[in-house]
Amino acid sequence: MSSKKTSNDALLLDNQLCFALYSTSLAMTKRYKPLLSALKLTYPQYLVMLVLWENDGTSSVSHLAERLTLDSGTLTPLLKRMEQSGLLLRARASEDERRVNVLLTSAGHNLKKRAARIPDCLLNASGCSLSELQALTHQLQALRNSFTA
């Protein structure tokens, strides 16, 4: 009977890693919402900004897509809206017109100062120490890498 209970336990919602990740992602995105609304950014736009800030304000569209694991059909409209809001510029590379580069405007660079408080807000909301969150991040990155290998 214990093996039957074990197989039934395997199908309990609260025993599913996928649900724990999914529901945590929803809760985290909800926590980000007011912080990002103050910056007039959506969560996906914030992720684009993080990549651009870590690359001194410039990146190719293909690099952004790779880093964010987004396809061009999702990324292009996102970048277009960000360009319309004055945060970045898109330009074809002079050496290869098939390549599109993304460059932060001064408004995009200046937004970094206002966004600097966001990680601490999330750290405080998590109830975890910085080292605990760093370890969890590394574990999740390893899990993601295993699934995508």
Image (tube, rainbow, N blue to C red):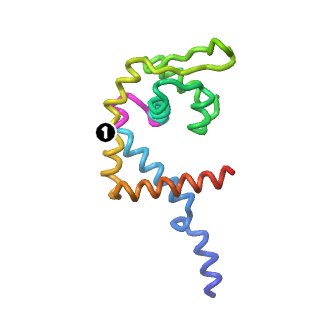
Identify the residue shown where x is 44% and y is 34%: 46
Horizontal side of residue 116 vs 53, given as left or right: left
Q: Which residue is more in the foreground, 129 or 14? A: 129
Horizontal side of residue 121 vs 139, given as left or right: left
| Percent of width and height locating residue 113 | 32, 30
Q: Residue 21 in magenta? A: no
Q: Which residue is more in the foreground, 136 or 16? A: 136
Q: Which residue is more in the foreground, 93 or 38? A: 93
Identify the residue shown where x is 63% and y is 87%: 1
| Percent of width and height locating residue 80 | 53, 20
Note whether 40 is above or below 142 in the view shown.
Answer: above
Mark 1, Cα crowd under 10 Å, few <14 / some 14-19 / many 20+, is few
Note whether 105 is above or below 131 in the view shown.
Answer: above
Q: Which residue is more in the foreground, 20 or 68? A: 68
> Mark 1 — residue?
117
Identify the residue shown where x is 66% and y is 50%: 148
Secondary structure of the residue carrying numbered label 1: loop
**Residue at the extreme bottom:** 1
The mark tally for this picture is 1
| Percent of width and height locating residue 141 | 55, 52
Identify the residue shown where x is 61% and y is 75%: 8
**Residue at the extreme top:** 94
Magenta stretch, residue numbers: 35-43
| Percent of width and height locating residue 20 | 50, 59
Note whether 106 is above or below 22 in the view shown.
Answer: above
* Image quadrant assignment for residue 19: bottom right
Q: Amino acid at mark 1?
A: Arg
